Amino acid sequence: MPNSLPPRKTPFSDYREREFLYLEELDAIIAATQNTRSPIRNSVIALLLFCQALQPVELCWLRWCDVDFTSNTLMVLRNRQKTSRSQPQLVLSLQQLSAVEIDFLQKLEAERTTDWLFASERKQRLSERSLRHIVQQAGTLATLPLTVHPYMLRRSGLYYRAALLLQPLGLSLRQCCLLWNWHKTSTYSAQQEQEYYAIERKTEEAFLIALEQIKAFSGITIEFNVIDYLLGAFMLFPGLKEIPQNYWLAPPNWQKKLEQTLPKRLTAIKSNRKHYRSNRF
C-alpha cells in the first residue's frame, strides 16, 4: 500500500474571520451563560477569561484557596518559563478582581462542592476540553456569527487593556510599530529614523511602560507575542476611538504601579537625540 501524506491542517481563517471578540459580543456571551446548565459557574468562567486574561489551563487549575475575598485578589500559578524539562520555573501572579467578579465568585462559593474553583458535574476538576465546550456553547446560544473558543475572550481582554494604555499617548499604529522596531530590531531606514526622533521622549517611554504592563499582566514572556497583543488594540478599536473607559467588565486599579524593567537603551535616548540633532543641523 503506497504511503500517503497526512492531511493538511485547516487554516484558522477557514473557521473564523478573526480571533477576538468585540465588547458587545462579550456581553452577549456572558448573558448567554445564564441559559446553560451551570449559569453561575459558566458566567465566572467567561468573566475571568476576559477580565484576568487567563489561559484555559490556568483557569482550570484554580482552587478556592487562590481567591482572597479580603483583598479582592486572585492568585494565578503560571508555568511559562522553563529552565529545563524537569525543572520548570513557576511564576505566581497576584491579580486584582473587579466588583462584578467578586459578586459572581461569592455566588459560586455558595454552591461549592470541591476545592476546585471550577468543578464538573462529577465534582472533578474541569477539563480544558469541557471549558472549550462551555465557551463554544455560549457563543452558539448568543447567536454569534463565528465559532468561539476560550482564547478569544482572553485575547479580547488584552486588546481592551492595551487600548486603554495606548489611547492617551496619541500614537498611530505606524508609530507603535516604529517604536517596537527601533527597540527590538535593528532594521530601519533613514526615513524611519527621522520619524522615530520626531516622537517625544515621554511618549516613547510611556509606550515601553505599556508594553511591560501588558507583559506583566498577561504573564507572557516572549516579547514578539506581547507586541501582537498590544497592537491588537487597533483591531478592537480602529484608530483607538470610542473606547469605553467605564466598561462594566474592567477591573479597577489594574494599571497600578508595577515593578518595571525598561530597556537600558531608554536611558540613553536623550543623549542620542542630541547627537542626532547636532549632526543634522
Image (cartoon, rainbow, N blue to C red):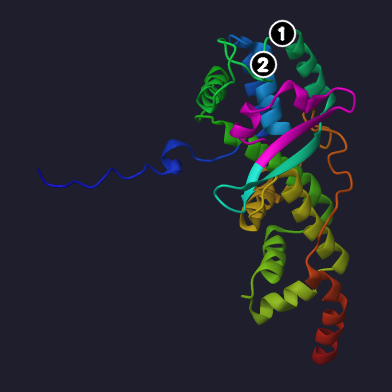
| Left or right position of 190 against 253 | left
Q: Secondary structure at mark 2?
A: helix
Q: Which residue is mark 2?
A: 41
Taking the image as shown, residue 229 lies to the left or right of residue 200, namely: left
- Residue 93 pos. (x, y %): 76, 40
Which residue is rendered at x = 66% and y = 52% of the image? 221
Q: Is residue 241 visible?
A: no
Pick out the residue farthest to the left.
1
Residue 41 % position (x, y): 66, 16
Q: Give the number of the disc on residue 111.
A: 1
Q: 10 Å neighbourhood of mark 2: few (<14), some, or many (≥20)?
A: many
Verify CB contact (< 8 Å) between mark 2 and mark 1: yes
Which residue does the image show at 75% across and 55% down from the upper left? Answer: 211
- Residue 64: within the magenta? yes
The quarter of the image holding the N terminus is top left
Residue beneath the point at 81% across and 60% down = 261
Name the kind of residue labelled 2 in the image: Arg
Residues drawn in magenta: 53-78
Task: Report x, y in % for residue 169.
Answer: 83, 56
Looking at the picture, tell me which residue is in the foreground, 224 or 177. 224
The answer to whether residue 8 is above or below residue 107 is below
Residue 12 numbered tag: none
Is 218 colored magenta in this rendering? no
Q: Quadrant of the C terminus?
A: bottom right
- With respect to residue 42, does 213 lie above or below? below
Viewer-side residue, 225 vs 24: 225
The type of residue carrying mark 1 is Glu
Q: Residue at x 67, y 31 (%)?
A: 49
Q: Is residue 86 left or right of residue 215?
A: left
Counting from the top left corner in percent of width and height, residue 176 is at: 71, 61
